[in-house]
Structures are given as structure tokens and as C-alpha cells.
Image (tube, rainbow, N blue to C red):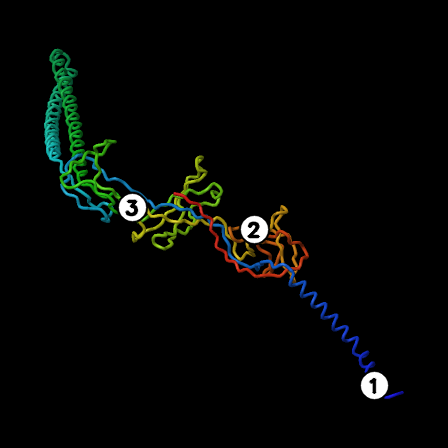
Amino acid sequence: MKPFSRVYVLWASIILAFLPGSLLTSCARNEAAENNAAESSAPIVPVARAQRANISDDLTVTAEFIPYQEIDVMAKVAGYIRTINVDIGDRVKTGQVLAVLEVPEMQDDIARAAAALEASQAEIVTATDDLNRAKSAHDMAHLSYTRVLNVSKKEPGLVPQQEVDEVHSKDLVAEAEVSAAQSTLQAAERKANITKADQARWQTLQKYTVITAPFAGVVTKRYANVGAMIQAGTASQTQAMPVVRLSQNSLLRLILPVPESAVPSVHNGQTVDVTVAALHRTFPGHVTRFADEVQKSTRTMDTEVDVSNPNLMLVPGMYADVKLRLQQSNNALTVPLDAVDESTGSPEVFAVRDSVIRILPVTTGLGTPQQQEIRSGIQENEFVVTGRHAGLHDGERVQTKLIESSETPTNRVKGS
């Protein structure tokens, strides 16, 4: 064999030895390229991670602070204001003197009642003396009659019957005088009781000239000044003018119009968060009472929340947002609300496992405006598709883009 032929055969052997490996490498490269092309053409879907969280369903209602109690302090008797000790904004205690009235004719009425009582007491003394005198006369007459009667019985005929009858008659007259004297004394005593009651009435009315605070609070309005004529506020009279307006602001009320759907979740003693935007602060409050009746016109139930205000930081008339907690679930497995698809009639989620979509039925629990509790069907930290699910099907290969979500439930109902 020629040298040239030997070289040719040698090169041919070398080429044949490396040819299968080259073909395999080329095929692998082509398959990888096809896979990369398939992955790059797969749709990108937003996903979120199923995580544990504490979620709650809250109802936020806006209401206005009102005093726990507020009254216009009226005068019980008519008179002129002699002194007034308070003004707008003053804090007063229970029983503190607010104003003093002057009623000149009342002193005359009190003096007249005292004089009538003295006269009644004098009549009682006189009637008592007359009763004692009548009793003494009756005792003598009765003793005389008894003696004459005994002699007449022991010695018949010794004492004429006419004399016996006369003595008996005197005894009966004396007894009648005792009864009359007793009646006179009783009448004098009743008259004295009447005059005592009349005197007590005028003394009570005199006490009403001193106007005091019925409860601790703040003077929010002053109607009258010194020298003003105040009518007795004992009836609905247009001319009856109050002295001051008093509000108890150490404890404030909020009247919430709770919707019918939330009524079953309201109960006395329930703790609520009261946020006052004007102060940029949140205060604790408690549900203390509710109407237990849904109004037909608004389909709401009036619910009162009491808020303690010892330092008077809160002012009646301020608006507040009250957050009522209707339901709560702790350490619940949650996904974004739009990750749950109910287009088929039952809840499903589109989970992504190894870049492939798996449509899984789930059991849902508590739902909020942002989050949905999942009780069964998926595992913690599993990725689920959020947003629209149209066009996606089970087994489809996709690319994922993680979307971070946070639970900020807000279910707001405006009220007054």
C-alpha cells in the first residue's frame, strides 16, 4: 500500500471514531435548545406564596362623640340671680354651687309659716289644759255619783232618787266635756302638723334657690347673668330660661349604625378600637348597650360604645372611626383573595409545581377584602396564581413572577 493511502485510511479511522460522539452532542444541544425555547415561550403568571397569618373580618363605622349625659340646669323656683359662680369651660363636681337665686317674698312666706306654727302650738297647749280641766271635773262628778249611788243601794230610801239622777247627769256631762276637749286637742295637733308641713315646704323651696350641679361635668353654655329673672322650670314653658348647660365628658358615647349583616357579631362588653383622626390617636372603647332591634328604614341597629375620657382630651362633636371585630382566625393558611377561582361553582386554586400548573380544589374559611383562608387543598409555602385565570389549564408549563402581598383588611361603612 502506498504511503498516501495509509494516511487516508488513518484519517478516515479517526473521523469514524469521533463521529458518534459528535452526533450525540449535537442532538443534546438541539434538545436543550428546544427546551429553552419552550420555556422562553411559556406564559409568565403572577404567583403568591401561601403563608400563615392572623386574619380578621373588621367593620369600621364612623360616628360622632356625644356626652355621656347632658342637661340644661333649670331653676325649681322663680327668682333673680344673685350670684353665678361658673362660666363656659369650668369643670364642676357633684353638688357644687352653680348659682344662687334671690326670692324676696319667700322670706315673708317662711316667716308666716313659722308664725302659724307657733299659733298652732299655742292652741295645742290651750287644748291640753282644757282637757286636763275636763278630766278633773269628770273625776269629781264621777266620784260624787259613785258615793251617792252606793249609799242609795245600802240604805234604800235614804237618798231621794231625784238626787241620784242629778248626780248621774253631772257625771255624764263631765264625761262629754272630756271627749270634747280631746277632740279639740286632736284638731289643734292636726293643724300644727299642717303648719309644720307648710313651713317645711317653704324651707325646701328656699333650698332650691341654691342651684347645684347634679353630676360632675363641664359647663358648656351659660344662659344667664347676675340680675337675670329666672322662671321656674317645672313645666314646658317658652319663657323658662336655663341657668347653664352641663355635660358629663369624662365618659363619652358613640352611637353606631351597625348593618343588619353584622348584628349577630355584636355583644355587650366587646372591646373596639376608636381612632380619632383629629388627634391621630386610637383609644379603647367598649360596647355597653344596643337597641336589639333593626330599624326598618336603614336596616341598621343602634349600638352604643363608651369611651373613657378622664383627661378630657376628647371633645363631644369629634368624629371617630370605630373598628368592630366580627370574626378572627389565628395562624390561618392564607392566599390573596384573587387567587381563589370560583367560576366552576366550587373554590379552586391554580398551584404551580415544577413550573407546571395544577388546578386543585380547596376548602375556604374566613375571607377578608384582601385575604382568603384556605383550610385544605394546598400546603404552606406553595405558589398559587393570582389575578385572572382565563386561558390557563391544568398541566400547562408557565413561568412565575412572585408578587408580595400584605393583609390590610378594611371593611368601612359610613355612619353618623
Q: Which amino acid does label 2 sit on?
A: Gly
Tag of residue 248: 3
Q: In which quarter of the image is residue 75?
A: top left
CA gap, disc 2 and disc 1: 81 Å
* 283 relative position to 394: left or right: left
Quadrant location, the N terminus: bottom right
CA gap, disc 1 and disc 3: 117 Å
Q: Which amino acid does label 1 sit on?
A: Val
- Camera-nearest residue between 263 and 12: 12
Tag of residue 7: 1
Q: Mark 2 points at which residue?
A: 365
Q: Is mark 1 on a helix, strand or loop?
A: helix
Dot 1 and dot 3 residues touching (CB under 8 Å): no
Question: Label 1 neighbourhood size at 10 Å, few (<14), some (14-19), many (20+)?
Answer: few
- Camera-nearest residue between 123 and 254: 254
Q: In which quarter of the image is residue 131?
A: top left
Question: Label 2 neighbourhood size at 10 Å, few (<14), some (14-19), many (20+)?
Answer: some
Q: Quadrant of residue 334?
A: bottom right
**Pointer 3 or 2: first along the chain:** 3
Say above or below: 54 vs 23: above
Looking at this rendering, what residue extends furthest in the bottom direction? 3
Q: Which amino acid does label 3 sit on?
A: Gln
